Image (cartoon, grey):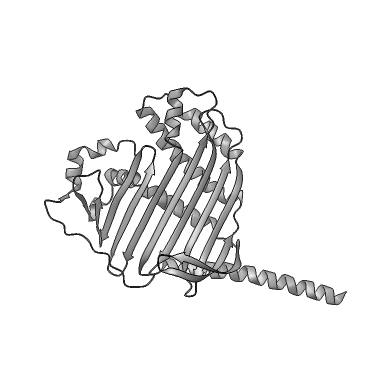
């Protein structure tokens, strides 16, 4: 009997040790990856949304169809020592595309997008204020920052386990990595759901108003609050992959969420996939700012005069 107890106790100690080690390995890898001075990162997000269409008229149905799919790709090359970065953004949301390139050099930011006839130059104190907030909203930058902050809080706990070795495909080619599983619960995901719902509702309400579709923001808020309370997570999946140098080279997420009691006009299912890849970490990278002249650039004052801020009134 004593031998059985000893074996059982030893097994528990080993299991506990593995769990702690996995968490520490993952935490250190995240810290090391975030601390690199140069590299490249690519983030992709894709969501498919299904609405309850019961009792809706044709006009509302046509409007909701435009919200059924969302995707965005962001790829960034950065060198912190040189204080330079280049971010390419592309995506589709509602009935329009998200497209642009952001160059950052020291305290200056250069915005290139088909929405503007010239490169927008933002220097020092220009990088604040209402116009910048609207630009961040236009490219969904603020939303990604908010989600990133919440996500870090979600995974900052001992819910990590190591699954084993795996070969994954990266922009650098196939590499050997260790696979880690982050176990997430409904309570972990809820802060992200609340923040995401607020963002989605705000944009959708404003767009519907612009299309002369009658909406009641208070009712939408109440219905969404009820839906979140009754939310059902069909799938919660998150994996991280760490290479031999201790960097997180890839993370992937897949969520399938059901809202059982929603009525006509509200979301009843979301299928979300997200992926982040890191490569060329701590290596020399090329982040070249294009040649800028008075002819191909515009200032924040010229942006105001162009009426672009009116175009962005209320966001995207």
Total label count? 0
68 relative position to 37: left or right: right
Residue at 60% from the left image edge and 67% from the top image edge: 162
For the residue pair 105 and 112, the one nearer the viewer reads as 112
Where in the figure is residue 254, as x and y percent of width and height? 53, 52
Front one among 78 and 65: 65
Q: Is residue 307 left or right of residue 280?
A: left
Residue at the (31%, 48%) spot, across then down: 99
Residue lying furthest bottom: 3
Asked whether residue 215 is in view, the answer is no
Tell me where residue 165 appears, x and y as whole percent: 57, 70
Place of residue 18 in the rendered image (x, y in percent of width and height, measured from the top left): 64, 71
Residue located at (27% from left, 59% from top) = 104
Q: Quadrant of the C terminus?
A: top left
Q: Quadrant of the N terminus?
A: bottom right
Q: Is residue 69 something one can see in this rendering?
A: yes
The residue shown at (41%, 56%) is 43
In front here: 229 or 113?
A: 113
200 relative position to 3: left or right: left
Q: Quadrant of residue 114?
A: top left
């Amino acid at each position: 009997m004593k031998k059985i107890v000893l074996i059982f106790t030893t097994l528990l100690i080993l299991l506990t040790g593995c769990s702690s080690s996995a968490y520490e390995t993952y935490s250190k890898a995240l810290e090391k990856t975030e601390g690199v001075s140069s590299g490249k990162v690519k983030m992709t997000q894709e969501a498919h949304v299904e609405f309850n269409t019961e009792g809706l008229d044709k006009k509302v149905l046509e409007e909701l169809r435009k919200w059924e799919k969302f995707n965005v790709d962001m790829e960034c090359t950065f060198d912190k020592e040189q204080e330079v970065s280049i971010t390419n953004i592309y995506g589709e949301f509602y009935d329009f595309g998200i497209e642009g390139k952001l160059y950052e050099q020291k305290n200056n930011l250069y915005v290139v997008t088909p929405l503007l006839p010239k490169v927008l130059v933002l220097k020092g104190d220009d990088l604040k204020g209402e116009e910048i907030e609207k630009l961040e909203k236009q490219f969904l930058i603020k939303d990604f920052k908010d989600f990133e902050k919440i996500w870090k809080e979600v995974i900052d706990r001992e819910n990590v386990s190591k699954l084993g070795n795996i070969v994954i495909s990266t922009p650098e080619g196939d590499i050997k990595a260790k696979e880690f599983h982050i176990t997430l619960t409904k309570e972990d995901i809820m802060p992200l759901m609340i923040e995401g719902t607020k963002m989605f509702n705000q944009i959708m309400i404003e767009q519907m108003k612009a299309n002369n579709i009658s909406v009641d923001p208070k009712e939408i808020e109440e219905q969404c609050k009820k839906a979140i309370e009754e939310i059902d997570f069909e799938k919660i999946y998150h994996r991280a992959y760490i290479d031999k140098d201790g960097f997180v080279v890839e993370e992937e997420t897949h969520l399938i969420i059901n809202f059982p009691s929603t009525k006509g006009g509200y979301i009843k299912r979301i299928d979300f996939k997200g992926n982040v890849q890191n490569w060329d970490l701590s290596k020399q990278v090329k982040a070249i700012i294009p040649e800028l002249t008075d002819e191909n650039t515009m200032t924040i004052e010229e942006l105001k005069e162009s009426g672009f801020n009116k175009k962005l009134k209320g966001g995207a």
